[in-house]
Image (cartoon, rainbow, N blue to C red):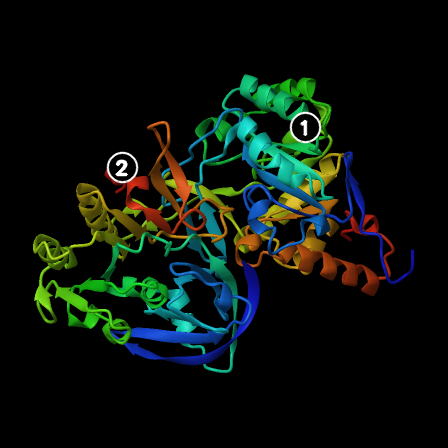
Amino acid sequence: MSLNSPDLSVNLGGVRMKNPVMVASGTFGYGPEYADLVDLNRLGALVVKGISLEPWRGNPPPRTVEVASGLINAIGLQNPGAEGFLRDYLPFLRQFDVPVIVNIWGRTVEEYAAVAERLSAADGLTALELNVSCPNVKEGRTAFGTNLPMFRRVLAAVRLKTRLPLIPKLAPDLSQIKAFAQAAEEEGADAISLINSIPALAIDIETRRPVLGNRTGGLSGPAIKPIALKLVWEAAQAVRIPIVGMGGIASAADAVEFIIAGASAVAIGTANFSEPTTALTVMDGLREYLIRHNLGTVKELVGALRC
Amino acid sequence: MQLETVLILEHRDYGAGYRLLKVAAPGIAPQVQPGQFVHVRVPRLNDAVLRRPFSVFQAQADMLSILYKTVGRGTAALAALAAGQTVGLIGPLGHGFPLDGPAERVPVLVAGGYGMAALYLVAQRLPRQGMVFVGGRSAQDILGIEDFTALGWPAHIATEDGTRGVRGLVTDVLDAWLGEGRQSRTPEFFACGPNGMLQAVGDRAQAGGWTAWLSVDRHMGCGVGACLTCVVKCKAPDGDWVWVRSCKEGPVFECRQIQWEEES
């Protein structure tokens, strides 16, 4: 390997990635949506939008609202269900040389286990991201994302049903982040991802009604980046399993910050909506940063915060 | 669909408070079908996380244009751009108006105000001549009539305050025409405007057993089908309903697809 081409590859708890830049669940559809604009083979990994056992309608519109440097969304996990995903999207995704990580969710422990089992029986999927922290489906957040015993139960149940690498996605709760990260590690998670969007509200002052059909939603985008960074840093000090850092990343500099804070990989989320090629520009910029700092591998930068 | 950084050729007042933005888009413009849109990355709007969608008004060779009115931060920033500057587009996007209907049908365009922007290409590219019905609150809301009459399409105008054309709703003028029994041929509707107008056009089409293509306007996110922001309640084959993406399966739907009674 020449000095001019640093090694960007990472092994994220068994997910072998060409580079540490993935696209986050819910911001990249199921693959075909952006395939005309982005070479999917260049992505570190593609995390598809949350899949449940059965199809799910999602919330009434309005489903998103733009706020200062951010987006509040309350899509409500609309998805075609496990069978619909496997039938309509997996054959397309298998044409590409990119790890496919499926974000999964359920309303009960049994539903989580069942969707994990069904997807694990399919050929061509790389890992499962466990969505226990979506702010837009009642059962998702209150029962699993912020309740430690429930979190352990769902993780243990899914762990029994799959050999695929498991990546629970943690809620952005500063007071509990270390406990949840450690619980994930103890229950057999191969990595953790954080943060999910932050519960938020926007109000139409003329009508005095919430802007979103679901009333509240989850805030994402540059507005949440400093909070996400702090949470990743906290989690990184608590566990040895790798971390996927995300929350408002729009540039290579943002990604470098997350890696220095302790993330082994990063995910591009809301930025995909305005600039679909953000993941590609981030990985190019990351490579330049490593060259500029005489680093031969991105791994040398992980958790390299000086303090 | 492609990403393209395009050069602004012309940016001027169009009338009725609207601005016309014409760009050189050699990648996107030749691909545009009537009723499709482009997703604009507005420069100098640094804290905005979304693009802004606009119907393609005119498209000819390598050029395309959009019409807009300054209504918010995005359009205010857009208004500050000058010829010679560049802007980022994704397009063409969405499922537009089909132009392959039977030749015996007479095309009837129905526009509510700014809705005419999405309909111009239908008139220009249809091999058969039809007519256009345009409505608005007052004379200031009626724009682009000359563009249709230049194509030889007669225009019927209605304003709610009577300052131009017939006093009333565009559907009043449409009903008068339908009631005259003058249409020896079957009408095929192409409509763009407020929900109430679209639903009214769809009701008339269904009552008459005719086809009506309706272009809906929904708050939009990614524009390419990934975020599921812009959904419309549509009938499902099994008699149930589903949320359908207006950016991908739409923005043009046949009136029988939309489940209006559930829409607010």
B15 and A197: which one is in front? B15
Instruction: Give the residue type that dot 2 points to.
Output: Glu
Left/right of residue A241 with respect to residue B85 in the rendered view: right
Q: Splitting the image into 4 quarters, where does residue A201 fall?
A: top left
Residue B232 has which mark? none
Residue denoted by label 1: A184
Q: Splitting the image into 4 quarters, where does residue B156 fall?
A: bottom left
Q: Quadrant of the C terminus of chain B?
A: top left
How many marks the image carries: the answer is: 2
Chain of the residue where label 1 is placed in the rendered structure:
A
Q: Where A232 sits versus B47, above or below?
A: above
x then y, percent, for residue B254:
32, 46
Are labels 1 and 2 on one chain?
no
Q: CA distance from mark 1 to mark 2?
A: 42 Å
x then y, percent, for residue A96:
70, 44
Q: Secondary structure at mark 1?
A: helix
Left/right of residue B7 with respect to residue B146 in the rendered view: right
Q: Nearer the viewer, mark 1 or mark 2?
A: 2
Tag 1 and tag 2, C-beta contact below 8 Å: no
A123 and B181: which one is in front? B181
x then y, percent, for residue B255:
28, 45
| Residue at the image point whose x is 74% and y is 58% from the top | A286
Residue denoted by label 2: B262
Q: Where A247 sits versus B4, above or below?
A: above
Q: Residues within 10 Å of mark 1 (few under 14, many from 20)?
A: many
Chain of the residue where label 2 is placed in the rendered structure:
B
